[in-house]
């Protein structure tokens, strides 16, 4: 299985390269693609944020003939109508997901900037959204990356990979992933 990563309002090449390296442990091939969509169509003037589901739908329409999974990476601040903000969204058992780094930056909350923390948070949220694509619901185990996160502290607290139960669930859905991956 292949993964296509779409940087959308995103230009952190160093982080993108590290992420590709990590995801190469799960996917046969990880490619970068640039969807031809106008993201401003997904902007809400009243909320000053971008409607996550709307972006996903636009990318799905623009890449209907492509194979494999699709992950959109963005720095845009995302929302869905019922929530103040979201870190990401994914189709359950689908092939499309989106993750925003906007609220994963330490400098969003304090004066500090920390590339390592940003990468760890991004990796967790990416594996989390891909987990939904793999058919996983939220997990009650805090050591599992499929635990839900309502704020960045909860992203930091939860584990960085799928628990044994979730790995089994993924395999039941006929998706082959390693039991553990080494994080470079
Ligand atoms: Zn989730
Ligand atoms: Zn789990």
Image: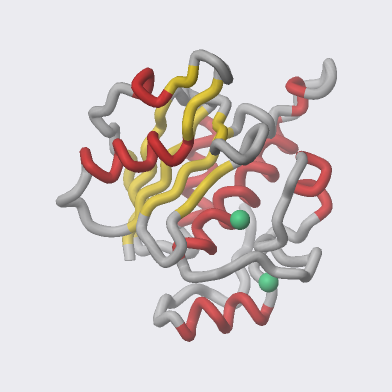
Residue 121: x and y in percent read 69, 43
Residue 113: x and y in percent read 76, 22
Q: Quadrant of residue 48?
A: top right
In front here: 38 or 79? 79
Residue 34: x and y in percent read 29, 32
Quadrant of the rendered image holding ligand 2 = bottom right
Report the residue at 47% width, 43% height from top.
98
Q: Is residue 27 above or below residue 34?
A: below
Report the residue at 83% width, 16% height from top.
111
Give the farthest residue toward the left: 65
Q: How is the image coloured?
A: secondary structure
Q: Quadrant of residue 72?
A: top left
Report the residue at 57% width, 26% height from top.
77
Apparent side of residue 96 relative to residue 180 in the rendered image (left or right)? left
Apparent side of residue 43 relative to residue 35 in the rendered image (left or right)? right
Which of the image's four quarters has the N terminus?
Answer: bottom left
Residue 12: x and y in percent read 51, 26
Report the residue at 53% width, 74% height from top.
178
Image mark count: 0
Apparent side of residue 163 relative to residue 179 in the rendered image (left or right)? right
Apparent side of residue 122 relative to residue 111 in the rendered image (left or right)? left
Q: Is residue 173 above or below residue 35?
A: below
């Amino acid at each position: 299985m292949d993964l296509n990563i779409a940087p959308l309002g995103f230009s952190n090449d160093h982080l993108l390269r590290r992420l590709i390296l990590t995801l190469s442990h799960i996917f046969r091939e990880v490619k970068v693609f640039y969807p031809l969509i106008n993201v401003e169509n997904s902007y809400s003037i009243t909320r000053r944020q971008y409607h996550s589901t709307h972006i996903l739908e636009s990318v799905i329409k623009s890449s209907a003939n492509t194979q494999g999974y699709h992950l959109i990476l963005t720095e845009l601040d995302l929302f869905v109508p019922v929530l103040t903000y979201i870190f990401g969204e994914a189709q359950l058992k689908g092939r499309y997901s989106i993750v925003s780094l906007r609220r994963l930056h330490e400098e969003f909350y304090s004066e500090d900037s920390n590339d390592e923390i940003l990468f760890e948070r991004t990796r967790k949220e990416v594996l989390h959204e891909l987990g939904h694509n793999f058919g996983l619901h939220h997990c009650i185990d805090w050591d599992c990356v499929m635990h839900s996160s309502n704020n960045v502290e909860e992203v930091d607290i939860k584990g960085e990979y799928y628990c044994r139960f979730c790995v089994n669930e993924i395999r039941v859905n006929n998706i082959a992933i390693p039991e553990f991956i080494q994080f470079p």
